Image (cartoon, rainbow, N blue to C red):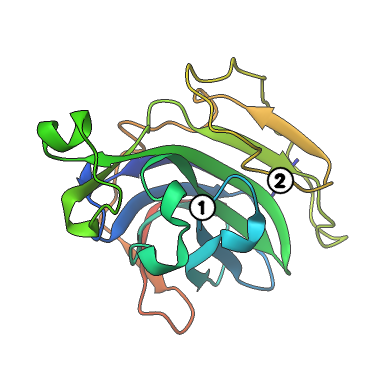
Amino acid sequence: MSVVTVTAVNVLNNPAPFTAPLEFEVHYEAFQDLEEDVEWKLVYVGSADSENQDQELESVLVGPVMSGKYKFVFQADAPDPSKIPKDDLVGLTAVLLSCSYREQEFLRIGYFVRVEFEDEKLKEDPPANPKVEQLQRNLLESDPRITHYAIDWPKHVQITPEVSTIYPPPPVEPEGNVQSDGKDVVEGSADDVQTEGGQDGGDNQGDSGSDTGLEVEVLEPLG
């Protein structure tokens, strides 16, 4: 149950060199006005064995939040490879795109990320100490993991029910759990958040994200 729902996410630069910025075109809908901004955050999972290896790549506040349909491009720098354990630099990991209101996370979209050598010879005979410039990343955008969390919305806000279904796990799982907290959750499928296409665009421009210069485009005002 949520006041803000993500309707589509398009991964823009994918696959890409490991050191390239990550970019997501996020489409979302707000069903009612909110008094405070919504926080969007992107986290790179450095190791499946410990959350201490996670890197927060970017965090932005988007607002004011008024009822309507919007989209914006969320860009973040690549993770710092020096903070990733050597044994976890190449292989399968994840990035987590989350949305929070008043420091309460109500939505998380996880993408598995395959980091591998671009050169076929290096794939067959990988070096013991890989160089970052030899690597590329590929977000498996066709199979996102979508999780809704129950939070305390303002009392005057009428909650809109979320419709979600549990979808089957991807064919390849990393060791460990990419989401490990004790919140009440409802998992969803790629049908709940579109990863290709998206909403039809509009000509109006909305306000920028708070203190970030982030451009938010109004697709369809409500009310």
Query: Is residue 2 visible to us here?
Result: yes
Which of the 4 image quadrants contains residue 167? top right
Left or right: where does residue 3 sit relative to residue 207?
Answer: right
Q: The N terminus is located in which quarter? A: top right
Can you give x and y, in whole percent of width and height, for residue 76 in the image? 36, 65
**Image mark for residue 2:** 2
**Image mark for residue 68:** 1
Residue kind at label 2, given as amino acid type: Ser
x 38%, y 33%: residue = 195
Between the C-alphas of marks 1 and 2, the distance is 14 Å
x 47%, y 42%: residue = 93
Can you give x and y, in whole percent of width and height, for residue 200 in the image? 31, 39
Left or right: where does residue 181 sit relative to residue 12?
Answer: right
Residue kind at label 1, given as amino acid type: Gly
x 48%, y 43%: residue = 94
Can you give x and y, in whole percent of width and height, for residue 10 in the image? 34, 41
Q: Secondary structure at mark 2?
A: loop
